[in-house]
Image (cartoon, rainbow, N blue to C red):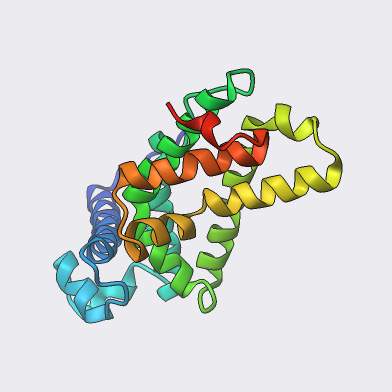
């Protein structure tokens, strides 16, 4: 049985606190999206419409705020985590679906993902979440390409999975899109044959 409060004043305070918490989280993510990857507490408070002194009434510390921001980003990214292909589909179909999914996912989470990687050495919550995210994406690769991996010996399968994990990582996305200046279309064109070569030894096999 759920017990609810009958004190309107108490309920009002709880609602205000939750609204302000969410405003701070959204303010932090908004600053990230705008290119400010290391905002000050004053900048976060201003973006949230709160006073700097009140900012940490809603969070225990910076780590707590980062954890909440990561959780919000995860929720926003959930619809982009699925790959529209199954292990039994042709390799070309799986490669194409995976590359499209990763490009869409990383484009959506790029600012927060960059911040997570910069801050992970200093914030345990970010390091933990980054580790979980990488493990999930690696499992996704292992499942999607399980037919090919099962056909290899253990050492070759480990090497192929490791290489695919690097190719499909956020770090590779950043290199292709920003360091090399490739459009999403050209980045995808670079990734598809490379992935196909890992699993089938046929670089042309993943081209449409």
User: Taking the image as drawn, is residue 92 in sight?
Assistant: yes
Q: Is residue 41 above or below residue 58?
A: below
Q: Along the line of sight, which residue is nearer the eye, 7 or 134?
A: 134
- In the figure, is residue 87 to the left or right of 5? right
Considering depth in this image, is 198 or 154 the residue closer to the camera?
Answer: 198
Please provide percent x and percent y for residue 184: 32, 45
Q: Position of residue 131 (x, y in %)?
A: 60, 59
Residue at 30% of width from left, 59% of height from top? 181
Picture quadrant of residue 116: bottom left
Q: Is residue 150 above or below residue 154?
A: above
Q: Position of residue 162 (x, y in %)?
A: 67, 52
Q: Quadrant of residue 166?
A: bottom right
Indicate the quadrant containing the C terminus: top left, top right, bottom left or bottom right: top left
Q: How many marks?
A: 0
Q: Is residue 61 visible?
A: no
Q: Compared with residue 140, is residue 67 higher up or lower down, i.e. above or below?
A: below
Q: Is residue 10 left or right of residue 153?
A: left
Asked whether 115 or 20 is in front, the reply is 115
Q: Quadrant of residue 64?
A: bottom left
Which of 176 and 111 lies nearest the eye of the viewer? 176
**Left or right of 155: which side holds 128?**
left
Q: Residue at x 40, y 41 (%)?
A: 189
Image point (36%, 66%), residue name? 179
Q: Position of residue 56 (x, y in %)?
A: 33, 74
């Amino acid at each position: 049985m759920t017990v609810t409060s009958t004190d309107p004043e108490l309920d009002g305070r709880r609602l205000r606190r939750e609204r302000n918490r969410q405003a701070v989280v959204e303010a932090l993510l908004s600053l990230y999206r705008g290119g400010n990857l290391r905002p000050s507490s004053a900048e976060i408070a201003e973006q949230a419409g709160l006073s700097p002194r009140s900012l940490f009434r809603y969070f225990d510390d910076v780590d707590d705020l980062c954890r909440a921001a990561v959780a919000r980003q995860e929720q926003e990214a959930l619809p982009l985590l699925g790959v529209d292909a199954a292990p039994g589909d042709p390799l070309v179909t799986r490669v194409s679906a995976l590359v499209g999914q990763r490009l869409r996912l990383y484009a959506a989470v790029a600012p927060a993902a960059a911040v997570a990687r910069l801050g992970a050495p200093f914030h345990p919550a970010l390091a933990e979440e980054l580790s979980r995210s990488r493990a999930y994406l690696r499992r996704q690769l292992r499942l999607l390409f399980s037919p090919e991996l099962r056909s290899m010996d253990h050492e070759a399968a480990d090497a192929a999975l490791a290489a695919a994990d690097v190719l499909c990582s956020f770090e590779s996305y950043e290199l292709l899109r920003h360091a090399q200046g490739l459009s999403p279309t050209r980045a995808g064109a670079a990734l598809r044959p490379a992935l196909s070569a890992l699993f089938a030894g046929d670089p042309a096999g993943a081209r449409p």
